[in-house]
Amino acid sequence: MTWGAPSGRSRWGPAKLAYGGTPGPEEERRAFEASLSAGVDLFDTAAMYSGGASERRLGKLAEGKQVVIATKFPPGWLSKTESFGEALEQSLARLQRSTIDLYQHHFPSRRISTPALMGLMADAVEAGKVRAIGVSNYSAAQLRIAHGALAQRGIPLASNQVEYSLLHRAPEENGVLDACRELGITLIAYQPLAMGALTGTYRPGDRPKGIRRLSRYYRGDGLKKMQPVVALLREIGEGYSRTPAQVALRWLIEKESILPIPGAKNGKQAASNAEALSFSLAGREIEALDHTTTAWRR
């Protein structure tokens, strides 16, 4: 979300204000290359991120590389269905690609008809400009509408990107995870480290900088309540010489049809994220994490 060099008001976008920008283009390159070296080849961005600068930076880094790029429409909060075609062409241009591997509707909106949009996305697939269609932040009911609209065109709905972590297990309760599994849709989990709360970096009285300190994870006694979770992550991690963050990511990877997408502002973070692929959790460890985070299922 923070890659690229935004201009104008995009310099103060929510992601920048929450996490700060990257240290610069060299660290973005290191993050990209560290991911590829570890076998991670899916990169998720959006037209909205950094006012399009994230797509431009990813397009430059991915030039000539065998990677899977996922991005999202629309470029702004007030976009309409009619702006789909232009937005797609602009994303293709910024990414320097003729085809987008996974094109996702960023968030449901009353201004955009889901069946109509799915029709336009299906047209883009048939035109060879999009390989797979996804959505983001869709409820179970909205997911079924999108899936049904695409099914009429003989095209599957590939994914639904929603917040999901040990500290945000709502998809298990609100029907989203069940709908994904029933319909054969991958759940892409964003904020899999709960805005950094699961890294073990922050403790009561030591909140992060930026506006994320105002999130539910850090307000009031939020940090105090999550200390048993972080302690368990650390205890499990010690057995594998892994960090709490890597264990938290692995918990998601172990689940059926779940794909976590942790962010990385530099090469060190990207390499650390990829370490979650290098070990497996025992059943009893997964059960312990499930039990300890029951309170976060709603």
Image (cartoon, rainbow, N blue to C red):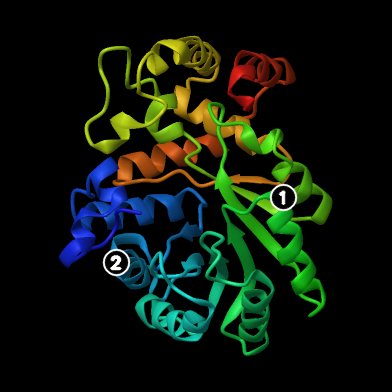
Q: Residue at x 35, y 17 (%)?
A: 220
25 shown above or below 112: above
Q: Amino acid at mark 1?
A: Ala
Q: Amino acid at mark 2?
A: Gly
Quadrant containing the C terminus in the rendered view: top right
Q: Position of residue 57 (x, y in %)?
A: 30, 67
Q: Residue at x 32, y 14 (%)?
A: 203
136 shown above or below 195: below
Q: Earlier in the sequence, mark 2 or mark 1?
A: 2
Q: Residue at x 51, y 61 (%)?
A: 106
Instruction: Name, please, the residue furthest toward the bottom.
Output: 127
Left or right, 59 with respect to 254, comes to left
Count residues near mark 2 (Cα–Cα under 10 Å), then give few for <14, some for 14-19, many for 20+: many
Q: Which mark is residue 192?
A: none
Element under disc 1 = helix
Q: Position of residue 274 (x, y in %)?
A: 48, 41
Q: Which mark is residue 51?
A: 2
Residue underneath mark 1? 140
